[in-house]
Image (cartoon, helix red, strand yellow):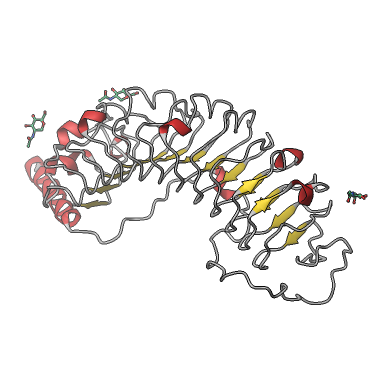
């Protein structure tokens, strides 16, 4: 009887292996928890609207009866129901209007503003959110933002900045500067920013030398750091150990120092797709961190699968140089006694390597919670 049972479960495993061996068209969606920072309200609109056409000489359209607020800039919309909000987005603006004192939320995205000057912001010390995304800003006058002690969110993605604006207020929680041409980050640009949770610098021209050694030093509560799509060759140094998400896709990173991730207690998402990582640059145990849930290493030059902990749920290794998978070797130490002790890997991508189905049996035997393997 025992033999039959064993045979039956083996057959079931073989069938699973067969099913999982089929190419799955789409990755399953992650159900892992998102960082709290993403649950906060975002400045509208979260996605960019289509690029506005060229500026015209027409004044912005009149949006209805005059505002009940006499201080409402004529270019903006000041709804009576949101006395703290100033809507000036998509208005063909080339200059920031004079912002009234009562404004907390300022929407200026999708215009043609090319510089930010101090006079516009002289009297609006209560500002909490500023969205200047998708403009043509090349320069920010020194100390414009410094005078805004209550500023929490500063969004300036999709502009033409060459450097991170200097003298940002220390109370900031979110800074979005993606899609600029930033290659320079002034020393101390993020100093004293103990509440900064999100720093997004993806799609810029940041090199190893743009990042001075202690640039992230004060960011004790940083949750998400996005440096993807830059030209880094090294892993950024002294990255805050509070991080939950670290995005470094599309750089030229060749190696990760041993113990790089050693002190991170919360790090759950690491993305290093499209880099130059090879086995030589990847210490075998570097990703053996128990907090890690989601690891992306696709489009690199790896021939071997790095070790990971039994807590990892998603592993992306597609488009590397992997020729063989030995389930016994990559099986993380775990409790053998029941299903719940099994490694938590649910999704594994191995397509674009030198492998062909079926998924080896020892992989299926180890990773009992696998829902899908793309091979
Ligand atoms: C700044 O705003 C306050 C409060 O509304 C107002 O009394 C003051 O005149 C304003 N100052 C300037 C320079 O606009
Ligand atoms: C990975 O780390 C865990 C705990 O930090 C440790 O127990 C385990 O032995 C490590 N894995 C390997 C293969 O060394
Ligand atoms: C996988 O690795 C283990 C341990 O290193 C070894 O005993 C086994 O023969 C390997 N399996 C294959 C199919 O190479």
Q: Residue 113's spot in the image, x, y percent?
A: 65, 58
Q: At 68% across and 64% down in the image, what residue appears? A: 93
From the viewer's side, name the closer residue of 25 and 109.
109
Residue 292 horizontal side relative to residue 284, left or right = right
User: Is residue 131 shown to the viewer in this render?
Assistant: no
Residue 135, horizontal then vertical, whole percent: 60, 58
Would residue 335 be found to the left or right of residue 176 on screen? left
Q: Quadrant of residue 81?
A: bottom right
Give the x, y percent position of residue 150: 75, 41
Task: Tell me if 66 is positioned left or right of 299 in this view.
Answer: right
Q: Residue at x 88, y 68 (%)?
A: 68
Q: Nearer the viewer, residue 160 or 368?
A: 160
Number of marks present in the image shown: 0
Q: For this rendering, which residue is in front, 26 or 47?
A: 47
Task: Tell me if 147 is positioned left or right of 168 in this view.
Answer: right
Residue depicted at x 14% and y 40%: 325
Residue 373: percent from left, percent from top: 23, 51
Relative to 150, residue 131 above or below: below
Question: Quick one: quadrant of the N terminus?
Answer: top left
Residue 278 in sight here:
yes
Question: Is 173 located above or below residue 372 in the figure?
Answer: above
Compare residues 204 and 56 and report the one nearer the observer.
56
Name the residue at the front extreme. Answer: 57
For the point 60% across and 61% down, which residue is it?
45
Image quarter for ligand 2 equals top left
């Amino acid at each position: 009887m025992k033999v039959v049972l064993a045979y039956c479960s083996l057959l079931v495993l073989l069938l699973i292996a067969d099913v999982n061996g089929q190419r799955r068209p789409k990755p399953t969606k992650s159900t892992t928890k998102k960082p709290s920072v993403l649950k906060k309200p975002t400045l509208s609109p979260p996605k960019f609207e289509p690029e506005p056409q060229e500026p015209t000489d027409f004044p912005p359209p009149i949006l209805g009866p005059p505002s009940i607020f006499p201080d409402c800039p004529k270019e903006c919309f000041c709804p009576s129901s949101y006395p703290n909000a100033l809507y000036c987005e998509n208005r063909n603006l080339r200059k920031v209007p004079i912002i009234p004192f009562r404004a907390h939320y300022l929407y200026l995205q999708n215009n043609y503003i090319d510089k930010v000057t101090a006079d516009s912001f002289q009297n609006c010390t209560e500002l909490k959110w500023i969205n200047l995304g998708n403009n043509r800003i090349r320069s920010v006058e020194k100390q414009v933002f410094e005078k805004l002690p209550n500023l929490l969110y500063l969004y300036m993605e999709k502009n033409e900045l060459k450097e991170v604006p200097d003298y940002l207020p220390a109370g900031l929680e979110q800074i979005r500067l993606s899609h600029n041409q930033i290659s320079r980050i002034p020393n101390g640009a993020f100093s004293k920013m103990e509440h900064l949770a999100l720093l997004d610098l993806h799609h810029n021209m940041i090199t190893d030398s743009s990042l001075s050694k202690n640039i992230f030093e004060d960011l004790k509560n940083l949750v998400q750091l996005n440096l993807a799509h830059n030209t880094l060759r090294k892993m950024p140094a002294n990255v805050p150990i509070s991080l939950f998400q670290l995005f470094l896709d599309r750089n030229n990173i060749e190696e990760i120092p041993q113990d790089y991730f050693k002190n991170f207690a919360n790090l759950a998402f690491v993305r290093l797709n499209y880099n130059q990582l090879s086995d030589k640059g990847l210490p075998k145990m570097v990703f053996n961190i128990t907090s890690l849930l989601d690891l992306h290493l696709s489009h690199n030059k790896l021939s071997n699968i790095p070790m990971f902990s039994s807590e990892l749920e998603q592993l992306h290794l597609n488009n590397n140089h992997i020729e063989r998978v030995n389930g016994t070797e990559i099986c993380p130490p775990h409790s053998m006694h029941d299903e719940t002790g099994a490694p938590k890997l649910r999704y594994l991508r191995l397509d674009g390597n030198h492998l062909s189905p079926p998924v080896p049996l020892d992989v299926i035997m180890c990773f009992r919670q696998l829902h899908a393997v793309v091979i």
